Image (cartoon, coloured by chain):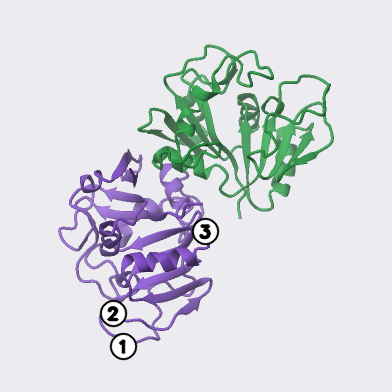
Chain colours: A purple, B green
Amino acid sequence: MTQLLRVQNFTVSSDGFGAGEGQSLERPFGHADPMSLMSWAGATASWKMRTEPGGSRGLDDYFIRDYDHNIGAEIMGRNKFGPQRGPWENEEWQGWWGDEPPFHTPVFVMTHHTRPSFTLSDTTFHFVDDDPAKVLEGAKESAQGKDVRVGGGATTIRAFLEADLVDTLHVVVAPSITLGSGARLWESPDELTDRFHLDVVPSPSGVVHHLFWRK
Amino acid sequence: MTQLLRVQNFTVSSDGFGAGEGQSLERPFGHADPMSLMSWAGATASWKMRTEPGGSRGLDDYFIRDYDHNIGAEIMGRNKFGPQRGPWENEEWQGWWGDEPPFHTPVFVMTHHTRPSFTLSDTTFHFVDDDPAKVLEGAKESAQGKDVRVGGGATTIRAFLEADLVDTLHVVVAPSITLGSGARLWESPDELTDRFHLDVVPSPSGVVHHLFWRK
């Protein structure tokens, strides 16, 4: 059984940024507006943070419900966990993800400053100071045969791409949003087509799904 | 938790037929060639009957891997089970699906001629002589909170549509195939748009995915 390393539902602006500049506790996406960047996802029936019934069950919903399908672990960069930089000054704060984090698997947070693991509901956060290959090795073991998701941000995904460890990527481009600066995934999707097949699928909702898989 | 009734990966010719005329033991799809009708599916990495490694992980693969995602039971017409008509003359023959049927859930075969249930691997076939609403009620109970799939053929899907019991449909149109006669799903997808939203999504592979969900 092949265990894949997958990027799922990662959304970027028309100019290739996954988040803006100036991340803070109040603004996890910096100057970018996450509600606008992720509005395609929020409109689907399967969006877990949906507060009212309803929502689309069209194309976008397939991607949303595939998010955790056969995923056994997530890897994320430290900035997806929280805004602190350098040594942890406040270990009581347990990340942006609340008491019921949406991962439901082990999560490996990449950081040069490790700290003890902790569990919130059915998600356990581990803090690892290793290179991508080593982190992936641990995540695969902990995923018990299932796939591993690289959750982002853009810098973390780029590190795994540079190490040639990614098997599939689903990147959503929001053509109506331009950020100008921030955490960049790419200048253009063409950067990846030497190593990956690419299906470009415009959604009726307006975003464009980019599906890459290894050649 | 809503239990949906879903049609998944049902493939029709450009003129709306799910199978040709003249079904027999040797030709489950009558004069239609199932290999050609389903070639979009056979090209994906997640296609379960794939004999060699490889295959696409692009758009079509999402639909293939969603096939049994959160499905707890299947309903099928008698002709999807086998070619016999009228009273069962040979109960030893246990359907077209082999010793390891690809359903892995209870399957409800609609027929006026019931017979005892039997189990092959992790699939149990039940034979029911009831109207669609009653069959769905039993399938939902047996699905234990998960969704129910209407597997086909076209006549069975139409019966559930006519009873207004279908929540979502994924129908794949193969534009290069014309059948002229057989089991018809529709004259045109427009027949359903009074009751359903519709995303029409052309795949880079050539087929066109039609995603319907209830208004």
Q: Chain of mark 2?
A: A
Q: Percent from the top left, x then y, of residue A87? A: 28, 85
Q: CA distance from mark 2 to mark 1?
A: 8 Å
Residue drawn at (43%, 54%), measured in percent from left and top? A4
Q: Percent from the top left, x then y, of residue A6? A: 39, 55
Residue A49 lies, with reference to residue B207, above or below; the image says below
Q: Amino acid at mark 3?
A: Gly
Q: Amino acid at mark 1?
A: Glu
Which is closer to the viewer, label 1 or label 3?
A: 3
Left or right? Give the position of B20 relative to A20. Answer: right
Q: Earlier in the sequence, mark 2 or mark 3?
A: 2
Secondary structure of residue under mark 2: loop
Q: Percent from the top left, x then y, of residue B100? A: 67, 40
State the residue position of label 1: A89
Q: CA distance from mark 2 to mark 3?
A: 33 Å
Secondary structure of residue under mark 3: loop
Which quadrant of the rendered structure holds the N terminus of chain B?
A: bottom right
Residue A116 lies, with reference to residue B126, above or below; the image says below
Left or right? Give the position of B106 relative to A20. Answer: right
State the residue position of label 3: A145
Q: Which is nearer the eye, B14 or A88?
A: A88
Q: Is residue A177 visible?
A: yes
